[in-house]
Amino acid sequence: MHSYIPGYLRARQTGRLKQAVQQALDMLSSCTLCPRQCRVDRTRDETGYCGAGRQAKVASFSPHFGEEPPLVGDHGSGTIFFSCCNLQCVFCQNHEISIRGEGHILFPNQLAAMMIRLQEQGCHNINFVTPTHVVPQILEALDRAVNLGLRIPLVYNCSGYESPDTLALLDGIIDIYMPDFKFWDNAAAGRFCNAPDYRETAQAAISAMHAQVGDLKMDDAGVACSGLLVRHLVMPGRLEDTRQILEFLKTSVSPGTHVNLMSQYRPVGEAFRFSDLCHPLSVTEFRQALDMGKDSGLNLIR
């Protein structure tokens, strides 16, 4: 990592970061940060689908060792868990913060200090978890954090339900994109996430992310410093989604794409209301998903 210069430092030198901060803040007065296009005035603390107002709200922050190995290294990924969410899956394991919005409001100087604290603790990166609805606040704080000495890569850890205009603001600033690709079946995405356009939106978003940062790259210690890493939560009875998503990543994004096939689905939140979500993923189904992943030739992260 010593030889890698984070994109936001180059963006700061050219004035690109300050420009992105202002463009993002301008979007808050009629919010179009995500595909929901709520157009509420968040500068007045009006709230749309995600439930967020003018300031970012954070549920927790810490060095995290449960993330993918290329992010964790020896000292952990510096995770900042933002409250609220623009997707709000009925089965979300963090529904207390993503849907109910539990957390504490932070102003830009506080969020910047949080980034510096994680860096001081030895974290290999700053990992923004559920950042889509607070991109302006992140950029606002990032500009201040650079002044305080922030020098480690940034991870954009999101649901895959992203706006191309918001991603364009992050071009040259975010180092590592880690989106989910949850569903291929739009009917399921409509039922479980109220996002019947999820597949096309995630396809466009992940393609745009890869165009910005390319395949995942590691430093000499095997820690990621830039690139794309895609997560896919394997769900009960939805192996066809898994197959189609892997095929899309291989043929339309890059055969070198790094993918984490995740097995931890369990029925929580509002999942009990849906008969096809009421049971955990079986060992057999996950093994079948892993076989699909191996057959795809993509870089599986374990």
Image: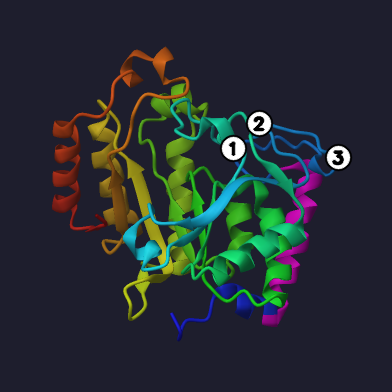
Which portion, as a residue range, is magenta? 13-31
Q: Which residue extends farthest bottom?
A: 3
How busy is the neighbourhood of tag 3: few (under 14 within 10 Å), some, or many (20 plus)?
A: few
Quadrant housing the N terminus: bottom left
Q: Nearer the viewer, residue 219 or 20?
A: 219
Instruction: Tell me which residue sits at (37%, 71%) in the image.
Output: 223
**Dot placed on the residue nearer the N-terminal end, 3 or 2:** 3
Taking the magenta stretch, the answer to whether it contains residue 175 is no
> SS of the residue at dot 3?
helix
Mark 2 touching mark 1, by CB under 8 A? yes
Amino acid under disc 2: Tyr
Q: Position of residue 295 (x, y in %)?
A: 13, 51
Q: Quote the CA–CA distance across marks 1 and 3.
A: 19 Å
Residue tagged 2: 49
Mark 1 touching mark 3, by CB under 8 A? no
Q: Which residue extends farthest front?
A: 121
Instruction: Tell me which residue sits at (69%, 81%) in the image.
Output: 14
Q: Nearer the viewer, residue 205 or 218?
A: 218
Q: Position of residue 217 (x, y in %)?
A: 36, 72
Residue tagged 3: 44
Q: Position of residue 249 (x, y in %)?
A: 31, 53
Residue tagged 1: 86
Q: Quote the CA–CA distance across marks 3 and 2.
A: 16 Å
Taking the magenta stretch, the answer to whether it contains residue 19 is yes
Amino acid under disc 1: Asn
Q: Position of residue 244 (x, y in %)?
A: 27, 41
Q: Quadrant of residue 91?
A: top left
Label the magenta part by its dominant secondary structure.
helix
How busy is the neighbourhood of tag 1: few (under 14 within 10 Å), some, or many (20 plus)?
A: many
Residue 242 placement, left or right of 287: right
